[in-house]
Image: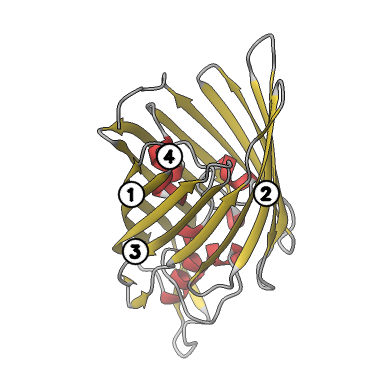
């Protein structure tokens, strides 16, 4: 089975349709910048300052230190151009910190195979009757640790291996994320991370830089009532090849006094680049009953029309109390 460079370019460009305005330079493994959690997506991905579950692995590994029980969860999203976006992670306290393993996946499905016509410079092709498929996959492991009497300072690192596959072409590259977080005495949470720090990835004859990303987050103190909580978040971020953007988000919860179920409502509003097709507004919610949580997120696409929906489920075992 043969896949043309044009076919490779089209398949690998699909996620960039949802990214920030490009500088004209190509980037590999753009799927690493896409949503990896239903809860985080509902907040416009402004998650780094409040991440307290296994999803911290994808946003800021320092926050894994806040996970003090075995947790596991995954989420799926039918993404643009008939692709499927998913993520899964498990975290467990070990020693003075918490370790997590996880994966991100972007499945492009399959398409008819074409071979280029002579003299067309790859712009025209003839069908072969075959099909080509493509997938992006990243496997990762992270560790976060807390320091000090209050465990206010946290630091973490994630190492990952990203692999892209199109028909009979494949390529991969290793990368790392580093993150820090700090809890102020007045209840404010601060966090920052650098992600996708690594070498270039080569697929077929195309070599491109990984989308290294920086993000800085802050979360307000939690406003608590008898049965509700409310807090706000803000994030600034940028990935190489894109414009710096910002997000404002809020999350509120309400606990039912009879069943103990916790209902959550979330919203985010992002300032995006002019070439970004995503709607600035994201919405979502969740319900926690016992040790299980189900989350939902909605994200619209203005030019493409319609929207995408992400659903996630997670489980948290009883909290582990250990000296750190």
* Side (left or right) of 274 relative to 166: right
Q: How far apart in space, not on screen, are marks 3 and 4 (Cα)?
A: 31 Å
Position above or below: 237 against 292 = below
Q: Earlier in the sequence, mark 1 or mark 3?
A: 3
Q: How far apart in space, not on screen, are marks 4 and 2 (Cα)?
A: 24 Å
Disc 3, disc 2: CB below 8 Å? no
Q: Earlier in the sequence, mark 4 or mark 1?
A: 4
Quadrant in which residue 237 is drawn? bottom right
Q: Which residue is mark 2?
A: 249
List x then y, in percent, for residue 38. 57, 41
List x then y, in percent, for residue 286. 64, 31
Residue at x 63%, y 45% (from the top left corner): 220
Residue at x 62%, y 66% (from the top left corner): 245
Q: Which residue is mark 1?
A: 139
User: Nearer the viewer's eye, disc 1 or disc 2?
Assistant: 2
* Side (left or right) of 210 relative to 277: left
Q: Crowding at label 2, few (<14), some or many (≥20) Cα neighbours within 10 Å?
A: many
List x then y, in percent, for residue 163. 33, 58
Q: Which residue is mark 3?
A: 1
């Amino acid at each position: 089975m043969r896949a043309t460079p044009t076919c490779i370019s089209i398949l690998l460009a699909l996620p960039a349709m949802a990214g920030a305005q490009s500088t004209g330079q190509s980037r590999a493994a753009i799927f690493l910048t896409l949503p990896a959690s239903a809860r985080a997506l509902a907040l416009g991905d402004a998650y780094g300052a409040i991440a307290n579950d296994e999803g911290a692995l994808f946003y800021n590994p320092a926050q894994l230190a806040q996970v003090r029980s075995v947790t596991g969860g995954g989420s799926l999203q039918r993404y643009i151009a008939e692709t499927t976006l998913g993520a899964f992670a498990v975290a467990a306290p070990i020693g003075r910190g918490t370790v997590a393993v996880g994966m991100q996946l972007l499945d492009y499905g399959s398409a008819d195979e074409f071979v280029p016509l002579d003299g067309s410079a790859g712009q025209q092709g003839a069908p072969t009757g075959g099909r080509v498929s493509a997938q992006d996959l990243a496997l990762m492991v992270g560790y976060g640790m807390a320091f000090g009497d209050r465990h206010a300072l946290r630091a973490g690192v994630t190492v990952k291996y990203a692999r892209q596959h199109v028909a009979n072409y494949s390529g991969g590259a290793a990368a790392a994320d580093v993150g820090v977080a700090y809890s102020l005495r007045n209840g404010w949470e601060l966090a920052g991370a650098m992600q996708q720090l690594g070498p270039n990835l080569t697929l077929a004859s195309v070599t491109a830089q990984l989308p290294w990303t920086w993000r800085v987050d802050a979360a307000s103190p939690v406003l608590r009532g008898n049965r509700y909580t409310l807090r706000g978040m803000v994030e600034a971020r940028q990935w190489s090849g894109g414009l710096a953007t910002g997000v404002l988000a809020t999350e509120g919860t309400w606990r039912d006094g009879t069943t103990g179920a916790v209902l959550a409502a979330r919203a985010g509003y992002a300032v995006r680049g002019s070439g970004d097709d995503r709607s600035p507004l994201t919405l979502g919610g969740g319900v926690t009953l016992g040790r299980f949580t189900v989350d939902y997120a909605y994200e619209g696409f203005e030019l493409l029309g319609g929207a995408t929906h992400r659903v996630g489920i997670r489980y948290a075992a009883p909290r582990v109390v250990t000296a750190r």
